[in-house]
Image (spheres, coloured by chain):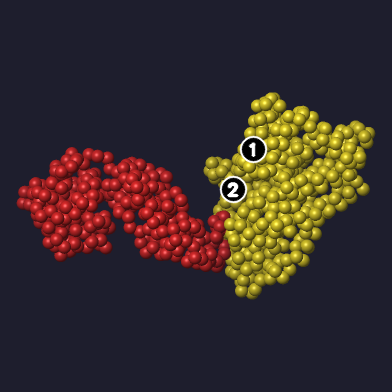
Amino acid sequence: MNILNYACRGISWQPRLRAENRDDVLKSMLDTLCTEEFLSVNDGLSKEGILHALIEREALRTTAVGNGIAFPHARLENLTRSLFAIATLEEPVQFGAETVNIVCLILVPVSDPSISLKLMAQFSRVLMDEPTRAQVLEARDSKTLEALFTHEDASIDKPLVARDIMRLPRWSVNEETPLSECAKMMSNYQLRAIPVLDDQKHIVGEITTDLLFRYGLPDFFARLKSVSFVAEFDPFEKYFEDERATQASSIMSHAPRIVEPEHTVMEIVFDLAVTSFNKLYVVDHTQRWIGTVTKGTILDNVINV
Amino acid sequence: MLFPIAVFLVVYLFIATEWVDKTIAAVIGGGLVVGLHIIGYEEALHAVDLNVLFLLIGMMVVVGTLSETGVFEWLAIKLARAAKGNGLRIAVLFMVLTAVLSAFLDNVTTVILMAPITILLTQLLEIPTAPLLIMEAIFSNIGGTATLVGDPPNILIGSQAHLSFNDFILNLTPPVLISMAVLIGIMVLLFGKRMNTTPETRKRIERSRPEKAIIQPLELRKALVVFGFILAGFFLGRVLNIEPGIIALVGGMVMVAVCKKSLHGALASVEWDTILFFAGLFMMVAALEVHGVFTALGHAILNACHGNLMWTAFAILWVSALASTIVNNIPLVMAMIPLVQGIVPVFAKQMGLEVPAEIHAQIAAPLLWSLALGACLGGNGTLVGASANVVIAQVANRNGCPITFGSFTKYGFPFMIVSLLVSSAYIYLRYFM
């Protein structure tokens, strides 16, 4: 299947859109996409209803994925056929904390959720390439925009791989980062694991909440069957004594799960669910960190589309 | 005769130096004596004393199940409260508890159970941790000497020399109790003021809630009933003509069933490496025995002691103790048992004894008890003398209160000498007066 099967000629490609904010972007895109014909074929759907569904999904967690790209999407009861629209923005808008200037809006029927992921994957592949992304932003008419997304293999039947669903690199520390800073970062952004990088952006280790706990708690504590019999004891005493002096390198695990961009979703699910890795770190051929896949990513992209 | 000795010594070198894991070394050693046809496979299999292995497995399951209930934390915190947070009193009570537990449980298990709660209490009371942990290892080795099930050398001696649980209590508990009393006295003198606590730290113990330590009250009650039956079985073993191995193994299984535990989980608390270590050693020692090595050694010892039984007993006590300070006492005892058994007939002939009961009472018993006392108490001599010492040092080092070879030996060696002096006096008074 080609992505063009899910596009509406002309109106799916919306370059240089002007909008004030996120909801305004979504509304404008829907105004163009939901023609009289669309609404008559999809009986029971309304622009307002679709907009509501999109905003509701954004409220759960932003669909922005970094690099100025967002994938607002919705599963709709009465939709007969999946479709998408891609807009570039004259002025970027905020999707939650993320600044976005390329919006790939996807609507799928409840009965066929997997299409949405395949479309997202295909768009990601195109937009991953920086020069192409710049060209997309420069496109002045719908034909040029369409050509950029379809000039190469635009089929969506490829198996999903890490590259398609990964989140771009965000939080990391280096080997010299004090533990106090690692803990603060993990606490602020509710992270279960952060990678430790060297100067070349190679991943040399990982700090997890489990490791922080194990480091902070005295060893004998873990050997007791219970501790409820003592009324007062500060198990983190040792931790607070030297959290500033201790560096990430001294407690990091040396075996973070590093995968190639071509790691399939099946392998990813196995790594995360069966072998219980917190995160998978995707690296390119030079071993540089280019993205992360977590259980949350899987929930967002594969299960909860 | 030289070939099996060479194999044994090479394997022993690996065990002593820990170049490879001792279990792997022993199992390969067992394989070598069979593979090189030093001993027939049937004979080797026959030498593996299942009574010993069953006893070890059974008791490991029992302790695993009991410890899950939180009963050991409860015992410790109860004692700390009974001592009203007084550091020295807690130290004394903890040593008694360690010795008593260790008399019925494996020494390593005892210190693994006692160490974490001891560290917690010393931190609450702000008293030094390392000396107390060292004392715990020492008292676990002493307590373990008192009964058949307390320490692997005793399990071996009991099984191989057909001595009952009660024989051990009657013959070994008295010197152990006397040694304990003397050593506790010395400990009190040594520690004195270092164990002082403040009213504030004592309050922390007052505010503890021992009842919260029991996390599986129902399982605990059931497990204790079964444990009672197992102990009764040990005491009545000779009357009922049932060996302790089968009592412990069946008791362990009954405990798992009655407490509705998963067998898989219960078997996970069995240290299978120890079991295989024993199996490998049994085969190696059998090879030496078959080739008459022990008979020859027995004669050598006899000559050295000029045929004097008492000196032989003392020699066994002190030599096995000093050897145990450096080498693992399990292979040592396993090799010493056939040696002692080889000496017995020579003495019997010399003393003109023919009735087996008399031979046992007058010759075998004093020698075997000397061996048991020496091998078990010798473990206190250095840090590497007993597994309990090594384990407690590991736990201590991981908790920021390092125990080194030197710091352990500083207490361990004099304590061992004192307990050996007590034992020597006991052996003299009891068997040779």
The residue identified by callout 2 is B65
* Left or right: where B164 falls relative to B397: right
Which color is chain A depicted in?
red
Query: Residue sitting at 12 percent across and 59 percent down?
Result: A17
Q: Position of residue B249 (x, y in %)?
A: 64, 39
Judged from the image, the secondary structure of the residue bearing numbered disc 1 is helix
Q: Kindly report the distance in space between the C-alpha atoms of the residues bearing marks 1 and 2.
A: 30 Å
Residue closest to the far bottom: B199
Query: Residue sitting at 78 percent across and 57 percent down?
Result: B414
Query: Residue sitting at 57 percent across and 55 percent down?
Result: A223
Q: Who is closer to the viewer here, A81 or B166?
A: A81
Amino acid type of the residue tagged 1 in the rendering: Ala
The residue identified by callout 1 is B25
Which color is chain B depicted in?
yellow
Q: Who is closer to the viewer here, B103 or A127?
A: A127
Q: Nearer the viewer, mark 1 or mark 2?
A: 1
Amino acid type of the residue tagged 2 in the rendering: Thr
Placement of the N terminus of chain A among the 4 image quadrants: top left
Report whether residue A10 is seen: yes
Report whether residue A265 is seen: no
Q: Position of residue B1 (x, y in %)?
A: 77, 29
Contact flag, marks 1 and 2 (Cβ < 8 Å) = no
Q: Name which quarter of the figure residue B125 lies in.
A: bottom right
Query: Is B209 above or below relative to A88?
Result: below
Label number found at residue B127: none
